[in-house]
Amino acid sequence: MPFINIFMFLCLLGFSAQKSTPADHSYVAAVVEYQVQSDAATNLQTYLQLIEDAGNQNADIVVFPEMTLTRGQSVVVPIYGLLKEYPVPASYPTLYDEILVSISAAAKQNQIYVVINVQELMNCSNGELSGEKCPEQKQYRFNTNVVFDRNGAVINRYRKINLFGELSRTAALAPDLGVFTTDFGVTFGHFICFDLMFQVPAIQIVQKNNITDVIFPTMWFSEMPYLTAVEIQQAYAHTMNVNFLAAGANNVRVGSTGSGIFSGKAGALISLMTGVPTTKLLVAEVPKEPGQVQGTYPGPIYDDPADQDNLLLKTDPSLLSHVSRLLKSGFEEFTLEDKDVNCHFRVRLSERNGDTNYRYRALAFSGVRTFDGVATGGAKVCSVLACTGEAIHTCGKR
């Protein structure tokens, strides 16, 4: 009989996770590589299950990718209106969209911080937006991150500043940076996908706020050789010396995949870039001092190479404009110049017997390039690339 009483008591208590505290040297993070389902209701139920799964693995925070939840429908996120007075949507379900109510309830039930990305609707003609600045009395749609704390309260919102071919959406009307502080002593910055390529917000958010942890929901379209998803995620974490929590949408037919948790110059605590349709929760213990990892970590998760053939990988169209030189066996020292870029190379190339798959080229570039015909940007590059042949048009290909 005493055994039954104890069992009933445990059931009444429910799940109790180990939370990180400000005194801890690390916290537990989860990011989701997510394959979009057929309808919004299915996506929402899958999100709720993943939040529970992350909580069951003692994660303090879970991050979801860009534009994988709402399937084109819009959500009102009145952070300066209703949410200021009633910050927990789960406690006021008649006032909020079902998505905000459901995610709020899941965050509260599992005692976990949750970051989602939605298409946000701001209706400037309804008079319910106290505190918002509306240039015109019309509807605006934004690409928006929404952050929930352990109590299910919405504590931060960030609207994407640098859009990538999103013709139905408006860039943030004011370049506000996304920043929030947690109960485990970590302040996070967050931005979205193409924002990574720009000084505002990707560089400014770290330097202005002196933060060491950044969140990154994305639907990245990988491009060889410089902009494949996990490559650029790790490069940002390394260069900025931050912990970087990247959650990627999964659609390998259009080249979208790539998620991971990276810690400064230590690299990937765990990462995934797959050629297979996948939804996967990635969890890792993250040191609060970037790069100061202890113990063992999963590291990169690799597919069978044949599976990677299913992943569409585009090639940088500016490669043909690079100044380049084919590398030869042995030691070489030389300089390549393109406008204001001067690249000095010291290279020793060793050939293994029977290794004829690749040749290698040194390259230099300074100029303006196009990103998938959607946007343009300046680039300055010194690099060594693998090529499938001796000509430059064979470089940047798998």
Image: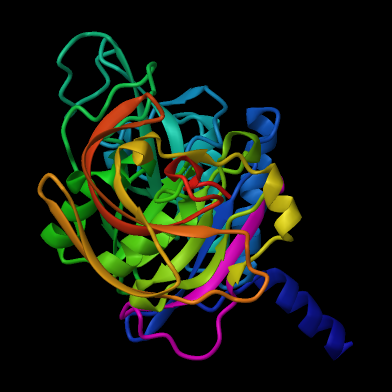
Q: Is residue 221 visible?
A: no
x, y (%) of residue 205?
19, 54
x, y (%) of residue 293?
42, 85
Give the image's coloring scheme.
Answer: rainbow
Residue numbers of the magenta segment: 276-299
Residue closest to the eye, 38 or 375: 375
x, y (%) of residue 315?
47, 39
Q: Is residue 204 visible?
A: yes
Whether the magenta-drawn stretch holds residue 83 is answered as no
Residue closest to the eye, 235 or 179: 235
Residue closest to the eye, 385 or 168: 385
Which residue appears at 49% of the width and 43% of the height? Answer: 222
Q: Is residue 223 above or below residue 349?
A: above
Quarter of the view holding residue 325: bottom left
Is 217 situated left or right of 300 in this image?
left
Quarter of the view holding residue 296: bottom right
Which residue appears at 46% of the width and 40% of the height? Answer: 393
Which residue appears at 54% of the width and 74% of the height? Answer: 351
Is 141 situated left or right of 261 in this image?
left
Whether the magenta-drawn stretch holds residue 293 is answered as yes
Residue closest to the eye, 203 or 225: 225
Quarter of the view holding residue 37: top right
Which residue appears at 52% of the width and 22% of the height? Answer: 73
x, y (%) of residue 1?
89, 87
